[in-house]
Image: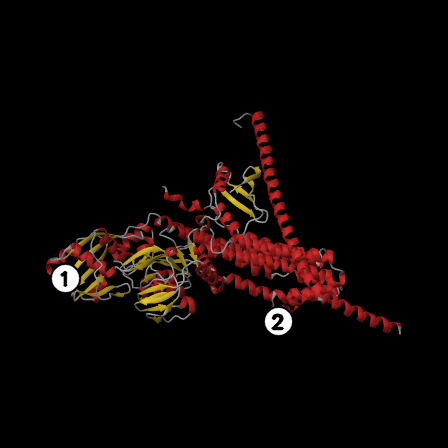
Amino acid sequence: MKVTVLHRAKGQMHLDLHRRRLSAEDADTLYYALTERPGVRGASVLWRTAQVVLRFDPCVPAAAEETLAFLRGADLSDPELKKLVPAVSARATNEQYKEEIGALIMARVAKKLLLPAPIRYAWTVLNGLPFIRAGLKDLSQKKFSAEIVHASAIAASILTADFPTAGSIIFLTKLGEILEEWTYKKSVDDLARSLALNVTNVWRVDGETTELVNIGQIRVGDRIHVYMGNVIPLDGVVAEGEAMVNQSALTGESVPVHKEVGLTVYAGTVIDEGDLVIEVRETSGQTRYDNIVKFIEQSESMVAVTQSQAEALVSRLIPYTFGTAALTWLLTRNVTKAASVLMVDFSCAIEVAMPISVLSAMREAGAHHITVKGGKFLEHIAAADTVVFDKTGTLTRSVPTVEAVVPMTGRDENEMLALAADLEAHFPHSLASAVVKAARERGLDYGVPHSKPEYIVAHGIVSIAAGQRVVIGSHHFVFDDEKTLVRPEDEEKLHALPLRYSQLYMAIDGVLAAIIGIDDPIKPETKQVIRRLKAAGLKNIVMMTGDSERTAAAIAAEAGIDRWYSEVLPEDKAHFVEQEKAAGHRVIMIGDGINDSPALSAADVGIAMKEGADIAREIADITLSGSDLEQLIALKELSDKLMLRMRSTGTLGIAANGAILLAGILGLVTPGTAALLHNTSTIALCLRNMTEMIPDEAHYSVDKAV
Amino acid sequence: MTKGWAFASGILVGTAGLSVLTSKLVMKGYKYIFAGAMIARDRIMADSEKVQAAVSNISAEAKEITERYYAKLDREYEEENGADA
């Protein structure tokens, strides 16, 4: 590509690409190719003139030369470069709104310059009608909205034959609407883009083999295998198997639907029971992106409680706005002054700036690899005082490892491990994955087909293998529920394993066959995180685990947690959460397995670890990526700051508009200026609310190096 | 009588004006007028891009000049008060 440098200054370069102009596609490719480059801070692609203005990070002195060399060797039709462009280009959206604003301003200038006054006035009236109609509609529905206020101001100006004022009110209202829509859309798109980036892996079935591949590699017609407890990642048709599918994410219906061969399944729904091989009908990309956007916009929980309260306050304020306007008119007999009172409406700041602060906080959480499913959850976190941790996979390292397999008399160690892996293979629990991993590492063949195992949540698994009934699970399940016997000669082997190991017991035909010792040390950052959560106001920290009292006490002591419950069942966890809630606490539940699901949904905020079961992630309100508990601290800080920001949005909005209102009453500003000031203050608030709240990410990994 | 004539001629001119405005020939002209308006709009947007580039060039240079100015002040201060100050 031929490139000439038109101008160069420190940290900036202005380039000409020697074309008449760039197509939208090329402009997108160029924009994303450039912004992805190291040392490039920003790029403005001026497509109409085929020029680019680049801004560089001053800390990377070679960035300008490198980028120039890259551009000279680049080909915009290169598919590798095109891949960088997301499904919905932020550049194209910005361009579209810029164009709209440009057209609006030009139309106004052209009208003023070219049209004779009477036609201009007629035009103004015609343009004002939709606003008045919208206002009347809201009025007839007894809804006090900003529309009524705008409509009244326009109508008052038209009725008093003050056409220029009516014209500027209409113009500024339209401008404000475009700017607000732009900022809102930008926030939603940014959020959706950050969510769409969370790539998932799927099991692709290829003839006999099944392999784990990135979702991006799946093509229409491919078959994918989805197991119990997992989210169906793509739309498709059931090719094999049958299952109960929970479609509540899509339909709101909480009763699972039966799916069998030939029926359509939808992306985002979860398999409650059974498993399916699905023939993919639609790949990710646009659909997935659209679904995310739809999800964001439809999600009722997006609206934070503070915001709904503020909105209620606003609709109560609107009659007073009218009162003030009427009073102004009575006192001054000046319609213009009364109209300028109407131009200042308090709702804008709250109706637009608040959702933007929430969306922006959600996006910022996304930047820290935290997925937040609704603004209200951030609010709950800010208000919470109780945190309930699941132990395994949450406080402890998410990859527990099998440390020892103790076979009972007459049993072979590897055979037992293979059998255990067989049973555990398809159940998403961290202990299960440990067993499967150990079997794989030892090169054992555990893929033996057998009748479908049955998973008894938090207890264990029952299956029939080679005509024998095999059970695997906790001490409680295997001995108390299943009444398993221990041969006298094996008695002492029961105590062979060290205390800190979690133990899985396996029995064949009612007789103990093996004990698997799994070590699950706590994560290095756990202690630090617990301390900081306490410092941040979460006084009540509780650990719950299905493990034995011994393991629980050891882990709790190490993590610095003073309250713990051992050998709890899933319903106990949920029950405990309910109890705490009833006692007036706001509860955060953090877990990762199927067995945490009831508690996750019972809590005010359910937080799931990304490595956990899909169903937990689906139910959870917030998911943390990987195993990094430090994200909790970031999440807490983000929530607290969001609350502050929302409160200050209310205060600032009311203060700024109050001042403009006063100026309007005193006749210091015309209605047009009032509208301009009002819109400017709203946009300024929106822009402030779009900024990052946590300035430095590095701040959260302070103690890692130590 | 004159008022009546004025009214009638007004109607006549009005209708004639309307029929001129809707006549086939003139109707053909409208698309060119609109196209012209759109081209004019694009020209203006392109010019605004030029202005945008110029403004950012100027501000980048202004930043550079400001930095140099303060760097010079710092140097002078150091020379007067010794480098260890």
Camera sees residue A550: no
Provide the residue designation for mark 1.
Answer: A486
Question: As drawn, is A663 to the left or to the right of A607?
Answer: right
Pinpoint the chain carrying mark 1.
Answer: A
At label 2, the amino acid type is Lys
Name the residue furthest front.
B25
- Of residues A125 and A241, the one nearer the viewer is A241
Camera sees residue A193: yes
At label 1, the amino acid type is Val
Question: As drawn, is A681 to the left or to the right of A389?
Answer: right
How far across and how far down the image is residue A44, in percent? 55, 47
Provide the residue designation for mark 2.
Answer: A137
How far across and how far down the image is residue A636, in percent? 44, 53
* Display coloring: secondary structure
The count of marks equals: 2
For marks 2 and 1 on the same chain, the one whose residue lies earlier in the sequence: 2
